Image: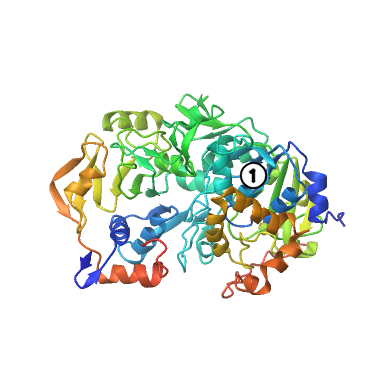
């Protein structure tokens, strides 16, 4: 029997996210832990460096709330909709008392950084950045000669978050975590991190994990806390459980265009609520029900075999 | 515009022209927005065998609906493979398995170099744009690059403010030398589809108008390009969208008109 790492979101964020930390809430469109982002806002964490390939609405909200001094990213936008206004205002100098430092890569550069961090390597080599202005904008992207004499490629440094937070379909109390659907770079971001918080739709018995070991992306070995927070990824989605709330992403556009409207949204939907349960109640059962998948598409099962 | 009895929008023409350009291609990296609908149209028309690759980590997607984002759950259900992003960019893109990468741009120059990062100075931007995403490595590693974007004086410029993704650099000779010496697998941009026409690249690596869409004029083309644009001697007229192409866009791919307005 492994020890239970199950914790409330409040306790996990209080104990594991510290002012000044580098925090990665990863998940590419899929499985973004908005619940953790909102709790970090409520606990008024400060001076964070936030890392994510796509800052998405979650970092737009967190940066609007003033938790961060720096953003490490590769694509800044609301996909298919428009911009992230709160971040943009701070970058374009509209709010000079709330500056935001940027450190910018490409997607491959960001996943390479997590991979180098996860493998304890000094850099990740990649065939990108040639003949572009990105290495000028970010001098941490550097050309290196192949030690085998066949040309020059680029290197990016390891990214080792103090805390990585991922949302998943299920985990055991010990933190063994299983995901299906888009995998993004959660595995790499988790192995790269000093501390890991896993937020799940469902807590399952260890036997469920052991019945399908190929689906485990993160072992409990590297997990510090397991938070059970159904719907914790809304308005992002969880494959097979609830759909992306595209209406929310569309509705965010007029909100984020104006600083006062953004702050009013944060008051109404984050500060004045004491946690995820209140958020879901406010969102309403009808809205949630509308996000359930329209049908079922179960995987075929495989037989791992027994070997005694 | 009219196609026989049917009217169509500039966006629909652009989507149809981009989809037709995919005929004969096998593996395509799908981007957000217009490329998403163009590639899905191609799969239903000129390129049924096309394998759709999404940077979110999907090979061989069979999306049942056209999603707002390119990380939608519909690209997973029924796909051939779901892989981590480091595998997608490393094994599929950098390994050279992608025939066509689709890119959009805020600014493009005559050699197909692309800016999606900033307008103005990087440190003090006038407008902060999304940045590279996967575009920079797609431009370098996809075997060829298609660009799809609307024309305007602000977007087709003599000099881009920031080079996010390399095209034919300062011209074909330089670009070919650097690609060869650097071991790039990509051959750079091959087609630019706009709301007015279709461009390919000449021997010098410069964009040249090859086909004019129905209703578009050379005056409109010249007014929306910030350099003296080359025009093919045998300039073609883009055939208008067929009834079937329009039906697929309107009924199956974009029933709410999100992309085609």
Name the one closer to the observer, B241 or A60. A60
Q: Check the image and name the residue furthest to the front.
A: A260
Does residue A124 appear left or right of residue A39 in this picture? left
Q: Is residue B149 above or below residue A233?
A: above
Q: Quadrant of the N terminus of chain A?
A: bottom right
Q: Residue at x 68, y 34 (%)?
A: A120
Does residue B47 appear left or right of residue A267 in this picture? left
Residue carrying label 1: A63
Residue A116 in view here: yes
Q: Residue at x 74, y 52 (%)?
A: A39
Residue B86 x, y percent position in the rendering: 56, 45
Residue B96 x, y percent position in the rendering: 42, 44
Q: Quadrant of the C terminus of chain A?
A: bottom right
Name the one closer to the observer, A142 or B7. B7
Corner quadrant of residue A113: top right
Does residue A242 appear left or right of residue B13 in this picture? right
Residue A59 x, y percent position in the rendering: 63, 47
Q: Residue at x 26, y 36 (%)?
A: B205
Colouring scheme applied when the structure was drawn: rainbow
Residue A150 x, y percent position in the rendering: 45, 27
Q: Secondary structure at mark 1?
A: helix
């Amino acid at each position: 029997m492994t020890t239970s790492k199950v914790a409330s979101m409040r306790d996990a964020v209080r104990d594991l996210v510290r002012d000044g930390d580098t925090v990665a809430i990863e998940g590419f469109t899929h499985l973004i832990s908005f619940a953790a982002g909102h709790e970090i806002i409520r606990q008024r964490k400060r001076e964070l460096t936030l890392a994510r390939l796509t800052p998405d609405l979650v970092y737009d909200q967190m940066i609007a709330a003033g938790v961060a001094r720096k953003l490490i990213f590769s694509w800044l936008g609301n996909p298919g909709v428009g911009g992230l206004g709160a971040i943009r205002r701070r970058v374009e100098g509209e709010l000079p008392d709330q500056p935001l430092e940027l450190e910018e890569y490409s997607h491959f550069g960001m996943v390479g950084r997590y991979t180098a961090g996860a493998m304890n390597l000094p850099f990740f080599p990649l065939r990108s950045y040639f003949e572009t202005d990105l290495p000028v904008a970010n001098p941490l992207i550097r050309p290196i000669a192949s030690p085998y004499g066949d040309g020059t490629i680029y290197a990016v440094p390891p990214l080792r978050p103090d805390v990585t937070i991922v949302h998943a379909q299920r985990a055991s109390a010990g933190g063994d975590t299983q995901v299906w659907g888009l995998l993004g770079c959660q595995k790499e971001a988790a192995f790269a991190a000093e501390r890991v918080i896993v937020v799940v739709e469902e807590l399952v018995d260890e036997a469920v994990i052991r019945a399908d070991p190929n689906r485990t992306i993160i072992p409990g070995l590297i997990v510090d806390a397991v938070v059970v927070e159904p719907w914790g990824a809304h308005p992002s989605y969880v494959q097979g459980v609830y759909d992306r709330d595209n209406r929310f992403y569309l509705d965010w556009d007029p909100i984020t265009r104006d600083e006062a409207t953004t702050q009013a949204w944060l008051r109404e939907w984050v500060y004045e609520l004491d946690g995820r349960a209140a958020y879901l109640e406010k969102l309403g059962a009808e809205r949630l029900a509308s996000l359930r998948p329209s049908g079922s598409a179960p995987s075929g099962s495989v037989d791992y075999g027994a070997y005694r | 515009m009219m196609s026989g009895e049917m009217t169509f929008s500039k966006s629909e023409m652009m989507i149809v022209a981009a989809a037709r350009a995919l005929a004969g291609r096998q593996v395509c990296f799908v981007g957000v927005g217009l490329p998403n609908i163009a590639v899905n149209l191609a799969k239903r028309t000129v390129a049924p065998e096309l394998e759709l690759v999404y940077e979110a980590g999907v090979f061989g997607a069979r999306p049942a609906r056209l999603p707002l984002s390119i990380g939608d759950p519909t690209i997973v259900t029924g796909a051939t493979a779901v892989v981590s992003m480091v595998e997608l960019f490393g094994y599929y893109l950098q390994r050279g398995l992608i025939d066509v990468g689709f890119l959009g741009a805020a600014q493009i120059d005559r050699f197909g170099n692309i800016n999606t990062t900033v307008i103005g100075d990087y440190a003090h931007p006038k407008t902060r744009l999304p940045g590279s995403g996967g575009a920079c490595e797609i431009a370098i590693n996809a075997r060829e690059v298609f660009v799809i974007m609307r024309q305007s004086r602000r977007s087709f410029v003599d000099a881009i403010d920031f080079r996010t993704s390399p095209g034919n650099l300062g011209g074909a000779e330089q670009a070919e030398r650097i690609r060869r010496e650097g071991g790039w697998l990509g051959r750079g941009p091959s087609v630019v589809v706009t709301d007015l026409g279709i461009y390919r690249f000449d021997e010098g690596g410069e964009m040249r108008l090859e086909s004019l869409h129905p209703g578009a004029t050379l005056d409109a083309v010249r007014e929306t390009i910030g350099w003296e644009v080359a025009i093919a001697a045998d300039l073609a007229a883009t055939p208008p969208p067929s009834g079937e192409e329009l039906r697929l866009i309107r009924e199956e791919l974009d029933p709410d008109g999100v992309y085609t307005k």
